[in-house]
Amino acid sequence: MRALLGAWRLLRVVAHVFVGIAVLALLFPRRDAVGRQWHIQHWSAGLLRCLGLRLTVQQQAAVAPASFIVLNHISWLDIACVHAALPQARFVSKADVRHWPLIGWMVAAAGTLFIERERKRDALRVVHHCAEALKAGDTVAVFPEGTTGTGPELLPFHANLLQAAVTVDAPLQPLALRFHAPGERFASATQFVGQTTLLQSVWRIATSRGLQAELKILPAIDTQGLERRVLAEVARERIQAEL
């Protein structure tokens, strides 16, 4: 039964992905920013439904325009969870995601900024692009851990990209994301660590029952007068406390 459930969900996901490709190719060029965000939000929420995942959002504060979002990183599903709640977010992602079949093209078309994390000079380029996006009124989102973790304990936060928020005095907006399932406060099915492949992760999620995601929008942090490493530590402490 679990295998049949997984197969049915994957069929729905494949159909949903092709719908997303059609929207990006045919409708996005003719939509303004608000229209594009509407499509991003509805497509992301639909992807979660296709996988049988229920998302709840707890908003402790409103998200200001041109905010710099930071959150913990667990799975490839994290972006869909955030976009289902905050479709205006432009993510900074590892460059290798751009080469994922279909998904890479889709996230690029949705406005994702890519970074070569192995190259220190590339971080400076991305900081510049993030600062320009913030000055233009865009909301930028990053995973300061730089890679996925298991959930309960956060990895150290890298502060380099936070310099963009410091440069333009943009508010730092922390989010706390947690996947859980019956009997598991931190769902094992969503852990995307070690030697786990993307296909293995997709199958584990598709065959899970009762999988839920909880996204908490925490109060923003004023960046004026603060150094990026201090901001990184403050944000990490607040997110860890919520988890």
Image (cartoon, rainbow, N blue to C red):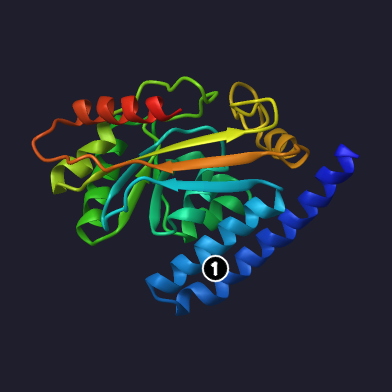
Q: Going by the picture, which residue comes out furthest to the right?
A: 1
Occupied quadrant, residue 86: bottom left
Front residue of 68 and 15: 68
Q: Residue at x 75, y 37 (%)?
A: 208
For residue 178, side relative to residue 22 (left or right): left
Front residue of 60 and 105: 60
| Percent coordinates x, y for residue 99 in the rendering | 56, 46
Front residue of 135 and 102: 135
Q: Going by the picture, which residue comes out furthest to the bottom?
A: 30
Mark yes or no: residue 85 visible.
yes
Q: Residue at x 63, y 40 (%)?
A: 212
| Percent coordinates x, y for residue 186 in the rendering | 59, 27
Question: Is 119 rendered above or below residue 95?
Answer: above
Mark yes or no: residue 145 visible.
no
Estimate how packed mark 1 is, as few (under 14), some (14 to 19) or many (20 or more) residues with alpha carbons within 10 Å. many
Q: Residue at x 40, y 71 (%)?
A: 34
Question: Is 234 rendered above or below residue 122?
Answer: above
- Residue labelled with disc 1: 24
| Percent coordinates x, y for residue 137 in the rendering | 25, 61
As helix, strand or loop, the secondary structure at mark 1 comes to: helix
Quadrant where the N terminus is found in the figure: top right
